[in-house]
Amino acid sequence: MDETEFWEIVDTTREAAEGDPEDHAELLVERLMQLDPDSVLDFARHFEARYNRAYTWDLWAAAAVLLGGADDDAFDYFRCWLIGQGRELFEGAVHDAETLAELLEDFDPALDGDGEDLGYATDEAYEQLTGLDSPDLGIAPQPPEPAGTPLDVADDTALAERLPRVWDRFGG
């Protein structure tokens, strides 16, 4: 599976779910179950590589602003949600978290930002197809610390200074 096919699957399942994150995850599992197990693992590698790329202080700051706070788990689920939003939004945000101020039409913390179920979709599809747990994907694990300059994601002043456009649009 190449990157284009990965994003096509993400986009078509998100569009079919009409923005509902739980429906998106269910549709993604259904779509992945139409593939062979090796292709599901390829999809999982693409997902995990992007999940690891999004492990940055700036994106954690963005998650904290958008969600009104973000602990480790909330940031993990935010990164899954970010992948689920598609290539343009994901790549823009990874390149510069401030672009979320322009790329997001709206954001409702009660509905958006939590892609926990998306993060488990490949494991669920693989297990349903094979009856086995997903094997090790053979890619480097997430680094121990996020990339970039550290900040206190619980400090509103630091968040506003780091991401002024995101803060102005979605913060405090």
Image (cartoon, rainbow, N blue to C red):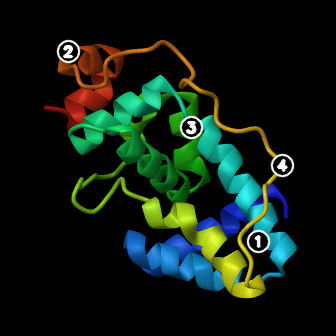
Task: Indicate whether 147 appears above or below 114.
Answer: above
Label 2, on which residue? 157
The disc, 3 or 2, on the residue closer to the chain's N-terminal end is 3
Asked which secondary structure carries label 4, the reply is loop
The disc, 4 or 2, on the residue closer to the chain's N-terminal end is 4
Q: Quadrant of residue 70?
A: top left
Label 4, on which residue? 138
Mark 4 is surrounded, within 10 Å at the Cα level, by few (under 14), some (14 to 19) or many (20 or more) other residues, namely: few
For the residues labelled 3 and 2, the Cα–Cα distance comes to 23 Å
For the residues labelled 4 and 3, the Cα–Cα distance comes to 19 Å
Asked which secondary structure carries label 3, the reply is loop
Task: Indicate whether 6 appears above or below 127.
Answer: above
Label 1, on which residue? 40
What residue occupies the far front of the structure in this picture?
Answer: 132
For the residues labelled 2 and 1, the Cα–Cα distance comes to 42 Å
Q: Which mark is residue 54?
A: 3
Q: Taking the image as drawn, is residue 18 in sight?
A: no
Amino acid under disc 1: Val
Q: Taking the image as drawn, is residue 164 in sight?
A: yes
The disc, 4 or 3, on the residue closer to the chain's N-terminal end is 3
Image quadrant holding the C terminus, namely top left
Mark 2 is surrounded, within 10 Å at the Cα level, by few (under 14), some (14 to 19) or many (20 or more) other residues, namely: few
> Measuring 68% from the left and 61% from the top, which residue is drawn there?
7
> Measuring 70% from the left and 45% from the top, which residue is drawn there?
49
Residue 101 horizontal side relative to residue 93, left or right: left
Residue 156 picture location, percent across and down: 19, 21
Residue 12 picture location, percent across and down: 59, 74
For the residues labelled 4 and 2, the Cα–Cα distance comes to 40 Å
